[in-house]
Image (cartoon, helix red, strand yellow):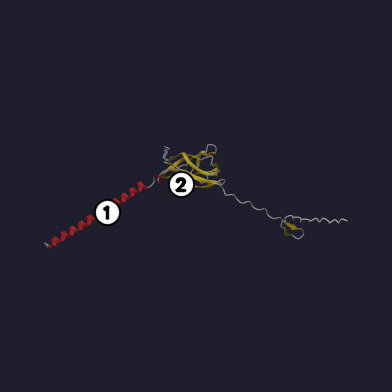
Amino acid sequence: LQSSVHSRFLLLLFTCIWGYNIAMRSIVLKTLYSLALLTFLVLPGSLFADTLSVSPSAGNLTVGHTSSIRILVSSPARSINAVSGTLSFPTDRLRVTSISKSNSVLTLWVQEPSFSNVSGTVTFEGVVPNPGYIGSNGTVITVNFMPTTPGTASIRLSSGSILANDGLGTNILRTLGKGSFSIMTAPSLPTPEPAPPVFDIEGGGEELYVEPVLPAVEDAVSTTVPRESYL
């Protein structure tokens, strides 16, 4: 009888331990799933979004000094084969000097990148042959700006499209970027003083420094009036 009770006790203990382990595993799995779901919901959508952006998006510029701003494309999850857009900028603060296609992820151009300093726009439209482009922060074009007036200059991608490489040309663009910059006046440089004259002594091959001499002030001349004697 005691042996039977002992066996039942061991079986009950084993059952409790097994049930506890199963319960703990379930709790751990539920916790991990909840954390993964919460992380996905909390992370910004732009992390996984298909975007057109500008880089840098903020900073200080100097009047008369050229600064480069890149337009970037990101499509981390889907292959794309075409990108287009329009960048707007204030003509009273900035002037485009040139556009570069160097290191662009686009290899064929439907419309060559162009700009207008009258309307304040930069336009571009290009494609990527199969298998397309997948990645983040790929360079589309680089715009070289010349700041002209101190103040704040805001630029933005006013329109654009990112077409998926799905055979349908689906526009998957979700976000258009913008930037804001502070433009400062270049510091004025001090005027250099003129160098003193240096003469070459003829025949000696030596240079002689001549210190400038100010014109001498003539000494005052005293006039003595002779004393006249009267008889």
Q: Which residue is mark 1?
A: 25
Furthest toward the front, the residue is: 231
Which is nearer the eye, 225 or 93? 225
Residue 142: percent from left, percent from top: 52, 44
Quadrant in which the C terminus appears = bottom right
Label 1 crowding class (10 Å Cα cut-off): few <14, some 14-19, many 20+? few
Can residue 58 be seen here? The reply is yes
Note whether residue 71 is visible. Answer: no
Give the crowd class for mark 2: few <14, some 14-19, many >=20 residues within 10 Å.
some
Measuring from the top left, give residue 124's x and y in whole percent: 50, 39
Q: Nearer the viewer, residue 31 or 134?
A: 31
Location of residue 198 (image quadrant) = bottom right
Residue tagged by mark 2? 137
Separation of residues labelled 2 and 1 (CA atoms): 41 Å
> What's the residue at 31%, 51% (across, down)?
32
Horizontal side of residue 29 vs 121, given as left or right: left
Q: Secondary structure at mark 2?
A: strand
Judging from the image, what secondary structure is the residue with disc 1 in? helix
Q: Indicate the position of residue 136 as horizontal and vertical percent values.
A: 44, 47
Task: Point out residue 200 in the picture as x, y percentages from the top left corner.
Answer: 74, 57
**Left or right, 138 with reference to 188:** left
Residue type at tag 1 = Arg
Residue drawn at the location 35% of the way across and 49% of the way down:
39
Tag of residue 116: none
Q: Residue at x 25, y 56 (%)?
A: 21
Sequence-wise first label, 2 or 1: 1
Q: Amino acid at mark 2?
A: Asn
